[in-house]
Amino acid sequence: MRVPFIGGNWKMNLSLTEAVAFVDELKQQLPDKNEVETVIAASPLFLSAMIDHSLNSPLQIAAENCFYEDYGAFTGEVSPKSLAEIKVPYVIVGHSERRRYFNETNDIVNKKVHSILRNQMTPIICCDETMGSLDSGDHFAWVVNQITTALHGIDEEVAKQVVIAYEPSWAIGTGNSASTSEAEEGCYLIRQTLADIYSDEVADEIRILYGGSVNDQNIVKLMQEPDIDGVLAGKASLQPSEFVKLANFKRLK
Ligand code: PEP
């Protein structure tokens, strides 16, 4: 059984004081970790404090990015080893904003996936889909190529633990979510791709999230789809009360 995964991606928002207050406010209102995993990804500057404040609660704190080398002359980058040292369990990689503004290619994503796994953390691999790929009708190939390249060289036993997020960039931050069937279609395509790369058994174990303007109005229907195992929410994760609603989606109507 795939445990539902409710993730928040704060991007470059909130202050350290707000981040800690957020954790303190919501940590008692989350479901048990075995029932629903709840994860917030935040700035590397906030992670240690957030991890300290979330101890003995179900909330897990993730990084939004890291570099692919552990050490070296890479001014301004964040080492995956240092994230592992402060016990970060998950790292987002290949978010569409990183691809668009920081030229993160599929090959770079693959290097980062290797480095995150080598440091005993779990990558949340974002798979973009642009309006351009939709218009030109090649969005299936676009998605398949991203997944195949991101997982190149990853053994199936290790691949089982990764999390993949299907995030059409036209739905991110626009308030214009993919429809339930569009989101399911993207997640199904990713699962089929995983089955082709590995096997049905491996594809069945990997959690696939949908991201793009998720909120308390659309999450219930999204979570009913067979291939959507969770969500990655940007805007709706910035308010504790909103994130608590997403985390407790089983109680929403
Ligand atoms: C995101 O940043 O990954 C995201 C899905 O943002 P939003 O929910 O605001 O569309």
Image: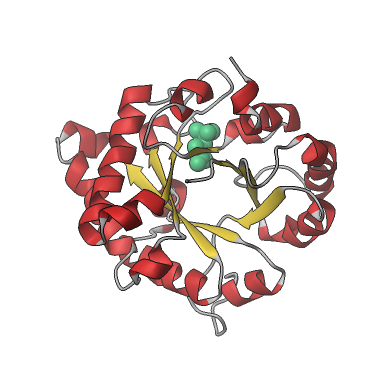
Q: Is residue 116 above or below residue 25?
A: below
Give the residue furthest to the left.
137
**Residue in the picture at 29% in, 68% down:** 152
Nearer the observer, 227 or 149: 227
x, y percentage for residue 4?
53, 41
Give the residue furthest to the bottom.
72
Nearer the observer, 192 or 45: 192
Instruction: Look at the image and name its color scheme.
Output: secondary structure
x, y percentage for residue 206?
41, 52
Total numbered circles: 0
**Residue in the picture at 42% in, 72% down:** 114
Nearer the observer, 40 or 207: 207
x, y percentage for residue 83?
64, 69
Q: In this view, does 68 lie to the left or right of 247?
A: left
Q: Is residue 39 above or below residue 168?
A: below
Q: In this view, does 34 lie to the left or right of 180?
A: right
Is any part of residue 179 visible from this angle?
no
Task: Specify the quadrant of the image occupied by residue 49.
Answer: bottom right
Quarter of the image with the C terminus is: top right
Task: Specify the quadrant of the image occupied by residue 77.
Answer: bottom right
x, y percentage for residue 63?
61, 58
**Residue in the picture at 56% in, 67% down:** 121
Q: Is residue 63 above or below residue 38?
A: below
Is any part of residue 47 visible from this angle?
yes
Q: In this view, does 156 lie to the left or right of 83?
A: left
Q: Is residue 118 above or below residue 72?
A: above
